[in-house]
Image (spheres, coloured by chain):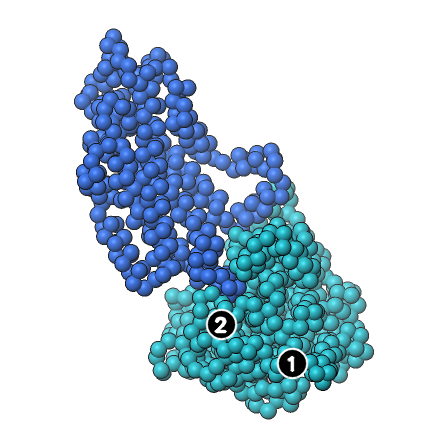
């Protein structure tokens, strides 16, 4: 498997250009293409939400309250007659920004802790590893709720809370990767050439142990979306009336019997986005671990 | 195979039983992505293995020798297939056999001895169980007698205390013993043909000799035909009746061993003979002598040359804290004179790698002292090597010793960055100079180490160490992973570099043939002790210690009497 991938990579490296690109496309399955389209749409709605919808997400329309999905309103409208599609699209930025902040916090702190724990070993490793064990023993969402209650409600605070509760996972994987890499002959060889501890860590150990952590990042990003949505659903996140995916589900809850699309559609959007991101993360992992 | 050789082999077949192996016009191809049909990697191969005969397939890596072995054994991977010719194993035409058709032949007709004994046995099963499975394949041993047969087989392949050993797990046995177990498995169902794919390349010289003696004995005793795959022409001529020389999937030469050896027809065979250290021991003698004289002349001329660049005295090292474990090094001493090549030889486990790592400052030591270029090495090794500009270690496996993410250019440049050469132009200039000296093309700079050939990788590793201009190189088996002809190129490069940069080499090797070619002085290590040390001609010519003699006996020897001496001079 790895041999084949490597051979492929050599081929693509040999002839750049449209031919190589077509070959890359040819290897993608239907699911991969769908995932790329979904992530593309999500990105567009983050950058320019106005492009995808003509309606204002905040403007009520009393005449059209709780309308079922139709050609004019693809996702229907909510209790105040606001277009659900445009609320979902305008909410994307808030949700994804929160997830990005959460992942960055987890990734940054986790990477540093893992690198330090593995490369220094001994007491440092023991202390960091036990703290990580404690963090991992508490359910992530529960931990995030505790943190957000301590920090106060709001989108950013929810993101910080989710980030903190994901540090442990990043630390674990970074530590185990560094442990394997730091005893490889080329690391020793670099020390032998006169490289100091910091130099070798930065130039050899870190770059060679980072790819596994990066593929976890994409996975963790999907998870962060779910957690942040959960926190807003429970009321710890973004305050109304600003649209946010978890909040949309929460608002639709009261009408779940009469107008089920208010819950089902934002829920589906969350699920599809998370699935698409994790599919892409798998794709990048397959490409990087050749 | 040429016509004369075919006739020669057929003379052996006097009885009616079919020959163990007949290969005629064989071509094997692999399907690759994007190609319609299989591309032939081996073309028009013909040879024959008679009863009680050993035929060697000799060639470098990529010559197709393993492909032929796999085709003959029905072990081609899914994308490989026989595209032309016929293969007859003990009378069965097997060229088009499916996996299912092969099954009854395995074990009972054909036995296979793999290259790496350690990874070829199930680590979780006792060896007795694994042999018993092979015995049951034959189907001629009643269930109740299987354990007795297993013990009999183990005794047959020379494992002592066989009845106790059947309960061992593979990790409890040494490499040589494991290879014996695999041979027992291969002969368990009384095959007619044994295929041995480099059966000893992972083993020490002395163990190699014992394993090959065992195979020879079994061949005579059981009338086996043996197809022996090797890259070592010296080994092939010593052990076989006929030799087939392969290059790039084509048979370059084939015939009785003596003919191939005495009157090689193809230039490739001649090149192999001259590149193999065992067949041309005097190849570098003149150069070595000239270099030694040069040093003496300079010393007499008044230039102050220090007596030693590396001085190891009474160094001891024990791994772990348990005083019961035998020490890896026990009071070892050696002295590396300037601009000389000092070879450190011994079997695996003799401590030669430990000593090399201690000298290189990579391993701490418990007792004694090490001086490198006049400076004392501390007993605890520092993280960053303070002696990098004086002494460099060249690793055995260049691929694992360089960062897989780095290009060749970055690899060679790294020591300069570490040692504070800030200007990019200056770095580029020095890399280009070194690249030229190790004869690497400039096009290699942008590639990664895995994208260049094995010989080039070792050149990259040498370039990286030389860019710091050290005075001593510790070479840890630098050519053991290379083919003989590439090995010869690297050795020549090492000699050139020594003359150019006035280098001294501490050369670790288990290949005494190579040591005999290039070493000025030799130190023999056994279980951490220096058993013999002195000028190469004395130690290798008149060994005083039994262990040295044993090591020397294990080197495959060309019957020099039979060889035309003029050819030695021509290549030497």
Label 1 resides on the chain identified as B
**Residue drawn at the location 38% of the way across and 45% of the way down:** A216
Say which chain is blue.
A
Q: Which mark is residue B305?
A: 1
- Disc 1 + disc 2, Cβ < 8 Å: no
Chain label for disc 2:
B
Percent position (x, y) of residue B564? 79, 79
Q: Quadrant of the C terminus of chain B?
A: bottom right
Say if residue B416 shows up in the picture.
yes
Task: Report crowding for label 1: few under 14, some 14 to 19, many 20 or more residues within 10 A (C-alpha).
Answer: some
Q: Nearer the viewer, residue B189 or B311?
A: B311
Q: Is residue B166 visible?
A: no
**How far separated are the C-alphas under marks 1 and 2?**
24 Å
- Against B345, residue B402 (above or below) is above
Residue B489, numbered circle: none
Q: Quadrant of the N terminus of chain B?
A: bottom right
Q: Secondary structure at mark 2?
A: loop
**Residue underneath mark 2:** B361
Q: Are marks 1 and 2 on the same chain?
A: yes
Q: Residue at x 46, y 51 (%)?
A: A207
Mark closest to the chain's N terminus, 1 or 2: 1
Q: Color used for chain B? A: cyan
| Quarter assignment of residue A166 | top left
Residue B385 coordinates in the image, percent (x, y): 49, 67
Q: Position of residue B307 (x, y in %)?
A: 61, 83
Mark count: 2
Q: Is residue B168 above or below residue B535?
A: above
Asked whether A112 or B234 is in front, the reply is A112
Left/right placement of residue B553 relative to residue B273 reads left
């Amino acid at each position: 498997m790895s041999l084949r991938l490597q051979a492929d990579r050599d081929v693509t490296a040999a002839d750049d250009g449209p031919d190589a690109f077509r070959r890359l496309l040819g290897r993608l399955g239907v699911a991969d293409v769908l995932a790329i389209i979904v992530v593309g749409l999500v990105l567009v709605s983050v950058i320019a939400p106005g492009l995808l919808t003509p309606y204002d997400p905040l403007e009520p329309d009393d005449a059209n309250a709780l309308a079922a999905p139709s050609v004019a309103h693809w996702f229907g409208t909510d209790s105040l007659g606001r277009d659900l599609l445009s609320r979902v699209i305008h909410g994307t930025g808030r949700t994804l920004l929160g997830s990005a902040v959460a992942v960055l916090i987890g990734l940054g702190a986790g990477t540093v802790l893992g690198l330090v724990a593995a490369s220094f070993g001994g007491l440092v490793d023991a202390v960091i590893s036990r703290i990580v064990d404690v963090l991992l023993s508490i359910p992530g969402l529960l931990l995030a709720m505790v943190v957000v209650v301590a920090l106060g409600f709001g989108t950013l605070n929810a993101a910080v809370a989710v980030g903190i509760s994901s540090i442990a996972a990043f630390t674990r994987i970074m530590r185990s990767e560094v442990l394997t890499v730091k005893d490889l002959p080329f690391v020793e060889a670099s020390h032998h050439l006169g490289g100091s501890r910091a130099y070798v860590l930065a130039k050899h150990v870190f770059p060679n142990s980072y790819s596994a952590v990066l593929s976890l990042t994409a996975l963790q990003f999907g998870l962060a979306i779910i957690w942040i949505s959960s926190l807003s659903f429970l009321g710890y996140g973004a305050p109304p009336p600003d649209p946010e995916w978890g909040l949309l589900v929460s608002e639709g809850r009261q009408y779940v019997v009469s107008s089920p699309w208010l819950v089902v559609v934002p829920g589906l959007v969350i699920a599809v986005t998370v699935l698409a991101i994790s599919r892409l993360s798998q794709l990048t992992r397959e490409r990087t671990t050749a | 195979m040429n016509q004369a050789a075919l006739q020669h082999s057929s003379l052996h077949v006097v009885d009616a039983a079919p020959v163990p192996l007949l290969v005629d016009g064989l071509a094997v191809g692999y399907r690759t992505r994007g190609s319609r049909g299989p591309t032939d990697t081996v073309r028009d191969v013909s040879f024959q293995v008679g009863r009680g005969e050993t035929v060697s397939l000799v060639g470098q890596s990529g010559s197709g020798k393993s492909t032929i072995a796999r085709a003959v054994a029905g072990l081609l991977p899914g994308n490989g297939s026989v595209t032309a010719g016929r293969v007859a194993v003990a009378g069965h035409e097997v060229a088009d056999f499916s996996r299912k058709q092969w099954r009854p032949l395995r074990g009972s007709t054909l036995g296979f001895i793999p290259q790496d004994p350690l990874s070829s046995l199930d680590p979780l099963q006792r060896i007795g169980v694994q042999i018993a499975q092979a015995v049951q394949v034959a189907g001629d041993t009643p269930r109740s007698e299987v354990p007795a047969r297993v013990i009999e087989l183990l005794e047959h392949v020379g494992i002592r205390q066989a009845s106790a050993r059947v309960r061992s797990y593979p990790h409890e046995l040494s490499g040589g013993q494991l290879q014996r177990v695999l041979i027992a498995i291969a002969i368990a169902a009384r095959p007619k043909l044994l295929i041995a794919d480099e059966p000893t390349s992972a083993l020490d010289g002395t163990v190699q000799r014992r394993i090959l003696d065992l195979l020879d004995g079994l061949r005579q005793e059981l009338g086996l035909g043996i197809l022996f795959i090797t890259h070592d022409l010296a080994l092939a001529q010593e052990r076989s009746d006929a030799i087939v020389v392969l290059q790039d999937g084509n048979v370059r030469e084939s015939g009785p061993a003596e003919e191939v050896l005495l009157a090689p027809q193809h230039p490739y065979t001649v090149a192999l003979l001259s590149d193999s250290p065992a067949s041309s021991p005097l190849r570098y003698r003149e150069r070595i002598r000239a270099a030694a004289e040069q040093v003496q002349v300079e010393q007499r001329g008044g230039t102050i040359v220090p007596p030693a660049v590396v001085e190891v005295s009474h160094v001891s090292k024990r791994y772990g804290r348990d005083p019961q474990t035998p020490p890896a090094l026990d009071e070892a001493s050696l002295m590396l004179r300037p601009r000389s090549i000092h070879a450190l030889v011994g079997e695996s486990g003799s401590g030669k790698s430990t000593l090399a790592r201690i000298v290189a400052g990579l391993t701490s030591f418990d007792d004694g002292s090490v001086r490198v270029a006049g400076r004392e090495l501390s007993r605890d090794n520092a993280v960053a090597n303070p002696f990098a500009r004086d002494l460099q270690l060249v690793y055995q496996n260049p691929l694992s010793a360089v960062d897989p993410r780095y290009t060749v250019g970055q690899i060679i440049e790294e020591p300069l960055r570490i040692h504070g050469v800030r200007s990019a132009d200056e770095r580029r200039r020095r890399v280009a100079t070194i690249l030229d000296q190790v004869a690497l093309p400039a096009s290699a700079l942008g590639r990664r180490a895995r994208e260049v050939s094995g010989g080039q990788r070792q050149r990259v590793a040498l370039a990286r160490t030389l860019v710091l201009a050290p005075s001593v190189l510790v070479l840890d088996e630098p050519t053991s992973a290379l083919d003989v002809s590439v090995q010869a190129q690297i050795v020549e490069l090492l000699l050139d570099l020594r003359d150019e940069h006035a280098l001294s080499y501490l050369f670790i090797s288990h290949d005494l043939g190579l040591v005999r070619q290039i070493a000025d002085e030799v130190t023999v290590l056994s279980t951490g002790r220096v058993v013999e040390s002195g000028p190469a001609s004395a130690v290798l010519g008149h060994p005083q210690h039994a262990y040295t003699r044993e090591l020397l006996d294990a080197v495959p020897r060309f019957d020099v009497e039979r060889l035309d001496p003029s050819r030695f001079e021509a290549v030497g």
